[in-house]
Image (cartoon, grey):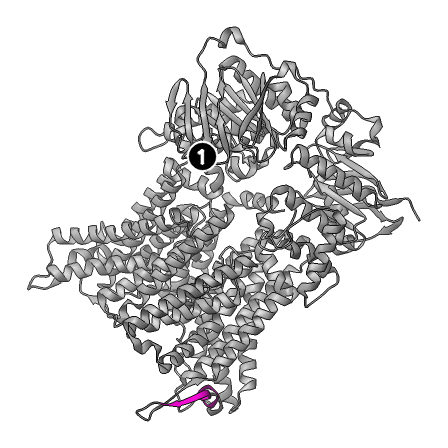
Amino acid sequence: MAWFQKSEVVIAGILVLAMILIGLVNPAFWSLDNMFSLLRSNIIIGIMALGVLLVMISGGIDVSFPAFAVAAMYLTIKGMLYFNYDGVVLPFVAAATMGALFGCLNAFFVYKFRMIPLIVTLGTGSMVRGFLLGVVGTSMININKMPDALIDFGKSDIINMVKPDGTTFGLTAMILVYVGLAIALHFVLRYTMIGRGVYALGGDPEAASRVGFNIRKITFFIYCVAGALAGFAGLLHSGMIWLANPRDFVGLELDVIAAVVLGGASIFGGRGSVLGTMLGVFMLVMVKNSLIIMKIDTTWQRVVVGVIIVIATAITAWRDRRANA
Amino acid sequence: MKNAMDFRNLLNKDNNIVQLIMMTILIFVVMTALSPDKFLRYYNFESITYTFPELGLLSIAMMIAMLTGGIDLSVIGIANLSGIFAGVMFKKFATDAGVADTGFGIVLMGGVIALGTGLVAGALNGLLITRLKITPILATLGTGQIFTGLAIVMTGGPAIVGFPNAWAFIGNGKILGLATPFVLFVVLACLIAFMLRRTTFGINLMLIGTNPKAALFAGLKREKMVLLSYMLTGVMASIAGIILSGRTNAAKSDYGTSYLLQAVLIAVLGGTNPAGGRGTVLGVSIAVVALMLLSSGFQILRFSNHLIDFIWGAFLLLVIALNAYKNRTR
Amino acid sequence: MSENFIELRNVRKEFAGVVALNDLSLTIRKGEIHCLAGENGSGKSTLIKVMSGVYQPDAGEVHIDGNRVENLSPMASIEHGVQVIYQDFSLFGNLTVAENLAMNVQLREQRRVLSWRRVREIAKEAVNRLGVELDLDKDVEQLPTAGKQLVAIARALMSDARLIIMDEPTTALTGKEIETLFRIVKDIQSRGIAILFVSHKMREMLEISEHITVIRNGQKVADGPTSDFDEALITRHMTGSDIVSEPYIWNREKYGVMPPRVETRDLSSGSDLDKINLSIKPGEIVGVSGLLGSGRTELALALFGMMPGYSGTIAINGQETTLDTPQDAIKAGVAYVPEDRLSEGLFLTQGIDRNMLSTSYEKLAPGLLIDQNKAEEWVETMIRDMQIATPTGKKLVKELSGGNQQRVVIARWLLTNAKFLILNGPTVGVDVGSKAEIHRIIRELAQKEGLAVLMISDDVPELVHNCNRIVLMHRGAFVEEMASVDTSEDQISDKLKNLT
């Protein structure tokens, strides 16, 4: 276990260093206002990252989740409008279920046909998004049409403060949802047999089936949970921005995968932790958001993200090689 | 059990081309039956010869990366960036008469810049993969962001419109009555096919993809060959970018993003093993033609682009399932 | 209660029309050490999979404790107490020793939630049962091979095993480790647990087992108490023919006057190699014996240019050369047949031709293109010279037997005109018949062509019969050199055991 802890300590160390650096360039970084908005930006990408983490520990990769998220979100809200339903719990259950069903599709192809997850998820992602935009529709659902309960839920804060100039700001309560899901996943990964099975599968699939793990069950679990998390995050996102856009989340897979890799998970499977992933997400979001604070043109954002991915993967590759040497 | 699976794969290897041809004929027949008057028009096929080469080249590029067990997710980024660099240069050198009449020498320089972009971008991928030992998926995912990001920085967002006429000829012109992109594709495909079968480089790629460790012990220059293969992939992508910008007379950071999935799909459909060691230009070429027929047929039937994306995705999954069924896993 | 634990009666198994097991019967009594002997491809692994429930026999019966068992599944097999320790141990390198040890128990108890305290308890008990020391908090991938094997055995014991099947357990072990293993096996037996020892190493079988079953081509060809067998008899049953080998004599008159093919002075590399002085003349076959980790593989790698940054000098054919890459070594005339043929030596899904030519393509393509005619000619010549059983050079290497595969690897190097051949475990996983054939080829090459050979092997008889000199390596250094005519197998085995 010392190994894992070490890797998280390293990530945390780099994170603190980066924070100090950004704070030096612009002290406004440390304002509560900025911190709260930073935390807020962590939520959606973080929940999705939890799903990707699960897939990565098992030795796979998932690029379909943004499509699943947007489909679950859009279909749920369409459904709410159709049935004139205004609530919170049921829609989230519906969105997560939809995501899980999409995830089943991934699991089915990965397990049954033993195809490389990257290619399977490229296919399912394209299918689901194509279906959503081609069959369901391409029009945005704006704030005036959005279900009120969802917006109210998205608006709830745990801390409310007033700035000297009279405007209020707060820390969204959604952060609790994110942290709760993270703790739950941590518990599952660390203290349940199926969680350990995910690590076993990522470590050596052949051995996992020999010692008696039910590979089919574990594969379905992994991709369904990843899908459910994506669906959940999708709906939460629309509740937080008061908008349901069926073209949302395009290209988000890159950010999320980058965050998970930053968090120390190995793309070869078997390694990764919830805490590390959360740190990775925080790091990525912080750097992206701080470009503005640091007065760097936003057009550079993608370049910066790309550079971060390359550096982070280079470091993990170097670490893995050293560990194996 | 895995061995048995590979074995059946191999029995099917020679059939693969036959199956692809049969599939192409089937698509042709079905589309003809559905909409004979529109599908069978000469214009339809002619327009396919203009549109498929860029995707075909990207698919061949993808196949080359897959031969060593890798993948290149940055091909679209490279293609766009190549077009944009050339476009930016043309704007710089534009005379008062406008970009369209730019001299031949400058167009040639634009070509060199575009190809050079592909070469450098590919070399970057190759170095990250061979020197820093980053997994190809992650390395090219990252560089893809960088290339696309640079494209945004160069253009500031909107497309660069207006390319020299000579440049447009590459994407729109005709040589001996055939579409220039088509001629270019055939020439390049033959070259690559020949290279894969008859040169040390080509065969080394196959061997490295089959078993990288054994390649090391057989004294193959693994790193050099993989680096070269990504450079070749990059150049192929930049040629696709040249054709794309020539054909549309514009270059933008997010053109052709749906090509990425399609290139992977076509490579796999064409019999390339994503785990490395197997793949032919012929297979990929037939696959791209088959899928372009399919896609144009659906367009004639007035399916939206999104629905075509859906169909491509479904097709990829179907291919996976069929291949697996053919090899009877589990 | 029956005295037999498991009994297979007239079992038959086919794969796509190919008969893997034919009317095979096997009885393992409670608490006995039973040896299953057979060449590669004789049906040993299919038999293991039938007993462990991975395969269902097409015909025949499986009886456990005297009761017929139908449709034995992997889970049912484990519940009956059958545990298989595969060659790769089926452990999880990314998890700790403790978790690996506790994994099976937790799974069998069908736990959903796991308590790490209980994991530790189980692990401690497992280690105590086996009576060994293991660091429970280490990741398994950090353990040496012998350590991994101990974890696998301890894990099997925790599953209330009544029969432990060990698939080639000694392959990756040497001297002392094998001794430890045998002590543990006997200890396990004393608790009434039966052991099925699957092997093709004759000496080990005779040493450890009480009962031997020999199979060939999916059929049982002999069984009986071990006292009824000797090495020659087992060999005869396994191969269906007698094999006699004469010791190798170096042609000193012819080659003694020539300069050495390879000569090292104080070759050192980190803690792996310590001042190695080695000189091999043409026609010599020099054997290297030593425990795993003695530096023998590192010596081979250094001579093949895979340990850059070594100190000391290496001279090939009297020319001092720097060998920093395999390409340097190949250019100098060094060839290396690696230990693990399947993962390091061959391109399994490619044809014989590409496998043979892999190192020669640059020579075949002086310009840009490969000379196809020359390539074909080379391949045909090699197939003929090496007597590889194939109708065409296009045949895929994975369809060849182990012996033929190894010949392909050797042929690859002959095509480069190598003058110095390093063989690391030249006949590991090669059946007895091909083994003799490969030895014959190597000896002929040395004797007639003046090839210098360095042969690294765990198989002491192999060294004694095929080498004119044998050096003993330990902790990266040469500790002793023997002329093989003056040395017996037992002497070397004893020396290996006494190394510490």
* Amino acid type, label 1: Met
Residue A213 vertical position relative to residue B304 in the rendered view, above or below: above
Residue furthest out toward the top: C253
Q: Residues within 10 Å of mark 1 (few under 14, many from 20)?
A: many
Q: Is residue A62 left or right of residue C201?
A: left
Residue B200 vertical position relative to residue C71 in the rendered view, above or below: above
| Residue A107 visible from this viewpoint | yes
Asked if the magenta segment contains residue A107, the reply would be: no
Residue C434 rendering spot, x and y as whole percentages:
63, 26
Q: Chain of mark 1?
A: C
Position of the C terminus of chain C, as image quadrant, is top right
Image point (44%, 84%), residue name: A172
Image point (58%, 45%), residue name: B8
Residue nearer the viewer, B260 or C287: C287
Residue nearer the viewer, A192 or C444: A192
Residue range (magenta): A152-162
Residue marked by disc 1: C306
Image point (58%, 43%), residue name: B7
Residue A115 vertical position relative to residue A30 in the rendered view, above or below: above
Image point (54%, 77%), residue name: A180
Q: Secondary structure at mark 1?
A: loop
Residue B140 rendering spot, x and y as whole percentages:
38, 56
Residue furthest out toward the bottom: A166
